[in-house]
């Protein structure tokens, strides 16, 4: 059963687990479980996703019941009128706060082949460092390993934006097999039994597309992510993000 975070006559939001695809994709042609189909089966009603989360990312995922609401919300996401907050665990200790302005080349969907047309697109991410830890393990070339809990707020919606931006500033997200660093990913899997990507969409704020009322939908990381937050003493900082 999917955890439903919000529902009314027009919208429904779930807490997407890490590892679940939003819809059928060539990312894994053998996969048979998708958020869209699972939610349709659970509530007995057709739904349409209005934005996406990567397979490895957990958290708030919003759907609409009607095509016109889907179009309206998709346009608002594209226009940057929806405020999104993510929690991430990254390698190293980034600055306490900052903005990443780094254009990103379009990434093809798996079905599109190896190339897509068009140059780099403007992309902006704001970040805040919420907590840090130093562990007595020589994971990399240093005698101790440093990690940080971050609040990330994308101001644009490029594919893998947060993952690529954190790599760009040399603080990749733990568990990111594509843009991260393998030795740190393996360390978290072996030392903390945490093999997932440590990126979660924890808040979505927007104006309701029908009533116009402010709407804020929140979730909290679960499973191995939540266990790690407790272990590192970061749970309170995560809740305050």
Image (tube, helix red, strand yellow):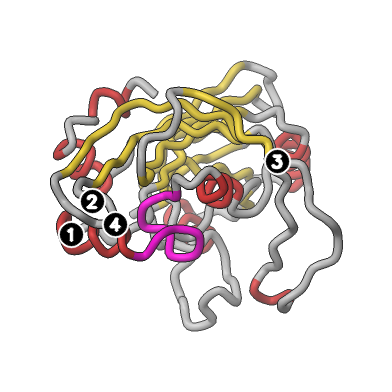
Q: Find disc 2 in the rendering and name its residue.
A: 224
Q: Quadrant of residue 233?
A: top left
Which secondary structure lies at badge 4?
Answer: loop
Query: Which disc is residue 239 wearing?
Result: none
**Can you tell which of label 3 and label 4 is closer to the viewer?**
4
Is residue 125 placed above or below 184 in the rendered structure? above
Image coordinates of residue 185 in percent, x first then y, are 32, 60
Query: In the image shown, does 131 or 159 lie closer to the viewer?
Result: 131
Give the foreground label among 3 and 1: 3
Most common SS among magenta residues: loop
Foreground pick, 34 / 168: 168
Q: Are marks 1 and 2 in contact (CB under 8 Å)?
A: yes
What range of the chain is rendered magenta? Answer: 172-182
Does residue 39 appear anywhere in the picture?
Answer: yes
Q: Could you say which disc has been placed on residue 123 in the image?
A: 3
Find the distance from the CA under tag 2 to the CA under tag 4. 23 Å
Work out how far the residue at label 3 is from the one at label 4, CA to CA, in angstroms.
30 Å
Is residue 41 at least partly visible in the picture?
no
Q: Is residue 174 magenta?
A: yes
For marks 2 and 4, the one nearer the N-term is: 4
Circle nearer the N terminus (1, 2) = 1
| Dots 3, 1 in contact, CB < 8 A | no
Q: CA distance from mark 3 to mark 1?
A: 33 Å
Q: Which mark is residue 140?
A: 4
């Amino acid at each position: 059963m999917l955890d439903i975070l919000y529902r009314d006559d027009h919208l429904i939001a779930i807490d997407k687990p890490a590892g679940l695809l939003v819809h059928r994709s060539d990312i894994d042609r053998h996969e048979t479980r998708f958020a869209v189909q699972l939610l349709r089966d659970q509530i007995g009603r057709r739904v349409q996703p209005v934005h996406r989360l990567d397979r490895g990312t957990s958290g708030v995922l919003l759907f609409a019941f009607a095509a016109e609401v889907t179009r309206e919300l998709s346009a608002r996401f594209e226009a940057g009128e929806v405020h999104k907050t993510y929690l991430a665990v990254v390698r190293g200790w980034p600055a306490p706060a900052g903005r990443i302005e780094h254009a990103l080349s379009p990434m093809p969907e798996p079905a599109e082949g190896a190339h897509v047309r068009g140059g780099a697109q403007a992309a902006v991410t704001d970040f805040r460092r919420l907590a840090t830890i130093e562990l007595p393990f020589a994971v990399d070339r240093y005698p101790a390993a440093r990690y940080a809990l971050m609040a990330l707020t994308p101001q644009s919606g490029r594919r893998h934006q947060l993952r690529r931006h954190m790599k760009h500033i040399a603080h990749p997200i733990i568990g990111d097999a594509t843009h991260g660093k393998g030795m740190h990913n393996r360390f978290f899997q072996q030392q903390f039994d945490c093999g997932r990507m440590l990126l979660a969409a924890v808040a979505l704020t927007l104006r309701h597309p029908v009533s116009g009322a402010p709407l804020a939908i929140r979730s909290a990381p679960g499973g191995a992510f939540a266990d790690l937050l407790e272990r590192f003493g970061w749970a309170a900082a995560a809740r305050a993000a």
